[in-house]
Amino acid sequence: MSKENYSPEELLFDTLDNLDIGFVKVSNDGTILNHNLTFNKIFGYSLEKNLIGTKTLDYWLNSQERNKFREILFKNGIVKKYITLAKKLDGEKIFLQINIKLNKNSKGEIISSEGTFMDVTKRIKNEQQLSESEMNYKNLLEHLGMLLLIIDRDEIFQVVNEKAAENMGGKPTDFIGKSLNDVFPKDIAENYGKIHQEIYKSGKGITFEHIINLPTGTGTFYTSEQPVKDINGDITAIQIISLDITESTITKHKLEESEKKLKTLNSELEQRIEERTHELNESEIKHKNLSNELKAILDLIPGLVFCKDKNDIVTRVNQNFAEILMLKKEDIIGKTTFDLFPEDQARKFREDDLEVISSGIPKLNIEESADFPSGKTWFITSKVPQFNEEGKSIGVIGLAIDITERKKAEQKLEESGILYRTTVDGLQDPLHVINQNLEIILINDALKQSVKLYGLYTDLIGKTIKEAFPFLHDNVLDEYRSVFNNKSTLLTVETTTLDEKQVTTETRKIPIFDDEENVIQIITIIRDITERKEAEQKLKESKEKYSTLAKLSPVGIFHTDQKGDYLYINERWSQIAGLTLDEALGGSWIGGLHPNDRKRVTAEWYNAVENQVPFESEYRFKRLDGKTSWVYGQAIAIKDDLGKITGYVGTITDISARKLTELKLKESEEKYRLISENANDIISILNDKFEIEHFNESAYQELLGYSKDEVIGNLSLNYIHPDDIERIVRLLKDCFKTGEGQGEVRIKNKIGKYFWFEANGKTFLDNNGEKKIIIVSRNITERKKAEQKLKESEEKYRTLFESSKNGIMFTNMKGIIIDCNQAFLDMLGYTLGELKEISYHQLTPEKWHEMSTDIFNNQFLLKGYTGEFEKEYIRKDGTIIPISINVWLIKDDQGNNKGMWAIVRNITERKKAELKLKESEEKYNNLFQYSNDAILLHDFEGNILEVNDRASDLFKYPKDEILALTTPMLRTSEEQERREALDEEFSKKGFIKFEFNFVKKDGTIFPGEVSSRAIEIKGKKVIQAEIRDISERKMVEQELREIYRLKSEFLRRASHELKTPLISIKGFSDLILSLYADQLDPAITSKLREINNGCKRLQNIINNLLKTSRLESTELKPKLQKEDLSFLIKFCMHELESLAKMRNQSIELNILNDLYANIEKEEIHDVLSNLLTNAIKYTPPMGKIEIKTELKEASVVVSIKDNGIGFNNEQKKKIFQQFGKIERYGQGLDLGIDGTGLG
């Protein structure tokens, strides 16, 4: 690049455009003087759009933020890293980071401001997302009701939420920073350590249910332990989420013991009462805070605020009201208007108050004054009625705005008008003022005299210019319109023929502006220059040749007298300086000099004249069209024949183009220097060997700690992270080929720490034509950290979100579901895609809509959360499930409502449990109240706590009297000794059944059967005693004992009576058979044998009767002795084995050997024989019979099992009754063995 074509400003703009850094230069009034293309890109304009001349206010989000920034800038002179909101062309809001400084001239005056800015919307939104994610995470922790812990690889607690700390018996700060061994017993800590090592090894989480002893008690927990990973996927910690399911476990027990549930219900009721009390307290605090806020707002209102009741008593005023009266608020409240103001003023104020109170209609914008200690003050007052809850007007509220300054301004305006009129009339030149309709609204006396002199109309007010001066050319009207449009003074010269005489006038049309800089009127000053024009014409003719030469000159030519006052200028001089001859003549040309040059050039010019030396200088003219011309001026003296100086002749050469180039070059270099020195980014220039040739030292020093000597000439790769070098070398080579490149890199600072930078490079040619790269590197370490934190936060949030057993959903403010976890999907049976198509309102049955809307409007929107409430949801399959839900409001960083989080629990099982519990309680109450037995509840000291109606009836006491008794007072004194023994048994078993004699109120004694057990009611253990009156049963038992005695006596006597004839019959039949059997007919012998067999059977029956009688005798005592039970069983089996073989039955013996027991051998023989005989009798042929023994504690159990027909429940009742017998005739059992049914 050649030196002539080298432009630091172009290079700067190209570099900034490449790096998306905007540049802007702004005038003091907010007009944009220059900008680069990135300015267009950031604000959404096309690159061809020239925005120079637009106002910066068009790009600020609002004027308040812009004014705040200007205040800081003009106070400090420079602003760095200022974050603000701006708006793009389409209205989209963006965040900008601004670096800008003020520019001053040589006199220290502020002339403009300039600087750079970057679009940091993405970074700010990342930070907002991080903040929002952290907020969501915290909200979930606060509302889930779960225990949450995060433990790092050293087993140190990093996070402990309130719920977890509460269960461990402390606060979060008590545990954070401590290890597992510090908090848990050694065995529990080691167990957790093993679980954690397994997670670190497998990379997978685990879920389990366990019981743990905590300082707050033993609890059952459902726990999920999940790994927390960093951006590289490495596990850095373990997140533990535990749900306390102790309550669920207890609920199962409560279904079995309904009394325990009563305690829980009472506890919940007390908790809800406590919560409601807490809510009321919060409401009271909010009301108090609202009152304080109202007082603060009243004090901030810039007017006077007052409240008065209908009796004119002041009830409230703001601080401004108190200050203007120079009193305290408490000194004003309670007083009347007449106590505070003079009577005439107070009367007027009171009339207005009464009018408002009686009509109930506000009275607004009353202009009035009042005398205060500080003097008379004018106000605009508005008064409105104050109503009570019934809508009755009870007072007045007023606001008075001080307009004293406005009144003073109006007075000054009036005085200014008088002064203005006096000034206008005092001018010697004719003058008139016209409005936008070109109508004359004001003339001075000089104009009146002038028009009268030429015989024109003097009544000009209200007439248009054309009507007042019909001789004017049409272009004069265009001139006036141009002044309205161009907003600048217009000077014209016109020649008119009046009274046959040509009159030349110089007219100045001067615009008058309103507050918004719009032209509303034009002042016209007319000067008669007829004589001057004639003199000029003569001079022009005399110098025609000279003028022709001067006109053709490329430089401006001027001629002055010996004092230095201008006598002549050529046209080129006028073009350069922007002044006419009239404006330049004499010393007037000095007025056309630039204000910053005027003093210097004037001094140099008159110094040259005074010392008679040539003049030479560079200076500027400030032209009337607003442009500035740079000139090189020089002059020499003109002498007469005597050598006397008669004047000076000189030239001015327009050097504006050169000066502009030099100025732009200087500004460009200054901008580059300022940006380079003040940039927050590192700016480096590398050669094709990647060596550092230049950098901005301040940024290097601030960000990396290197000085210029430590970096210049070094290889840039020496400062790059080893893992990035290969990629960066490739990127730099590509940049040299393509001309630009971009990437992220880690750069090492002076102490060896690496920082992340975003590098943007672009190539250029230096003065020697060598290609170099300019690289701007922006520190993005914080952004990288923020991205990492955001990812970790989202990972934590997602782990918690997905591992929750409760349903979690997020909706927008319209109720449309945005996201939910798997538990919520499982609960309702939908997919996430299906749920996104419906709102959560559609999940709710219609009967709950009104309640949900009421909670949303009157609770949720006011407090930001709902608290837990219950309703129902509709599953995808149409089934209705009960749920409990807790919803809270999510806001964005601007405080706007963004959406709603909800935690949903399926409480179907709980509802079933509650229903069963309710049914159980109802059953218990019904059983208690309607039981046929008397039921007493008493404590362990015997104090009666509750009884049912049956107890009152049984003991003949009214309920209130029996509740005043103790249990010993209801039983006979003889039972006390037995009771003490029973108490000991009861304390061991917790249950006991016994019989007692009780005493009624009238002294009647009755026997009762008592069943006592320990139960728990409302957390207190009591005894429930069920008492049944067994008087009738005792009488029946007595009668039965007598019947049994008579029966036994009958059996004994009957046996003896039957045995006597039986002995005779059997004896004679045996004798006949032994003596005459061979002599008798066989038929007779057969009959005799049948008689003999019948006698034997009858004898067995009689023996059984006698045995039964003997067994029922209370005097019978078994004669126990140690016998071999194994032998006895085998003996009985051998006795009946032949009978079993006759029926083709098999007997399997499965008994222990050498079984000895204390028994009465003959009786046990009869029992075993009877059981085995029955088995043989009732087992079909080919059947199987098994005899088995087993030991149970100190007893031997003998069982005989067959595969016979068996017996039903009714038959079971008969077999162990006296004389009980089951008949099997006709059932195909081939029975041939009879029984008596006695045993």
Image: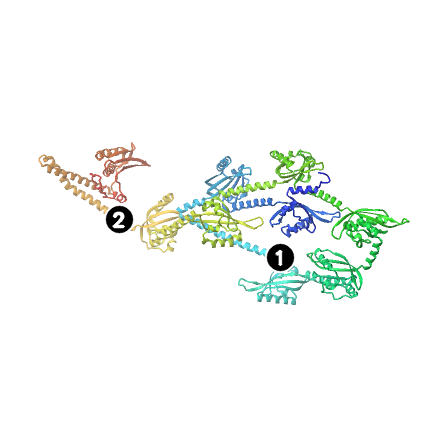
Residue that lies at the very extreme toward the right in this rendered image:
642
User: Which residue is under mark 1?
Assistant: 299
Residue furthest left in the image? 1079
Which residue is nearer to you in this view: 1063 or 682? Answer: 682
**Where's residue 129, x and y in %?**
57, 45
- Above or below for 428 versus 765: below
| The label number, if any, that marks residue 34 in the structure image | none
Looking at the image, residue 362 lies above or below residue 1222: below
- Quadrant where the N terminus is found in the figure: top right
**Number of residues whose C-alpha sits closer than 10 Å to that of mark 1, classed few (under 14), some (14–19) or many (20 or more):** some
Residue hosting label 2: 1038
Report how far apart the C-alphas of labels 1 and 2 lie in the structure. Answer: 99 Å
User: Tell me, what colour scheme is on the image?
Assistant: rainbow
Q: Is residue 1005 above or below residue 197?
A: below
Left or right: residue 441 compared with residue 271? right
Q: Amino acid at mark 2?
A: Gln
- Looking at the rendered structure, the kind of residue marked 1 is Asp
Camera-side residue of 780 and 1150: 780
Q: Could you tell me which secondary element the residue under label 2 belongs to?
A: helix
Labels 1 and 2: the sequence-earlier one? 1
CB under 8 Å between discs 1 and 2:
no
Which image quarter: residue 480?
bottom right
x then y, percent, for residue 485: 70, 56
Foreground of the two, 64 or 693: 693
Q: Secondary structure at mark 1?
A: helix
Coordinates of residue 397 in the picture (x, y in percent): 60, 62
Question: Is residue 82 shown left or right of residue 562?
Answer: left
- The spot of residue 487 in percent (x, y) is 71, 56
Disc 1 versus disc 2: nearer the observer: 1
Res 1184 seen here: yes
Structural crowding at the residue carrying mark 2, measured as other residues with C-alpha within 10 Å and reported as few (<14), some (14–19) or many (≥20): few
Q: Is residue 414 visible?
A: no
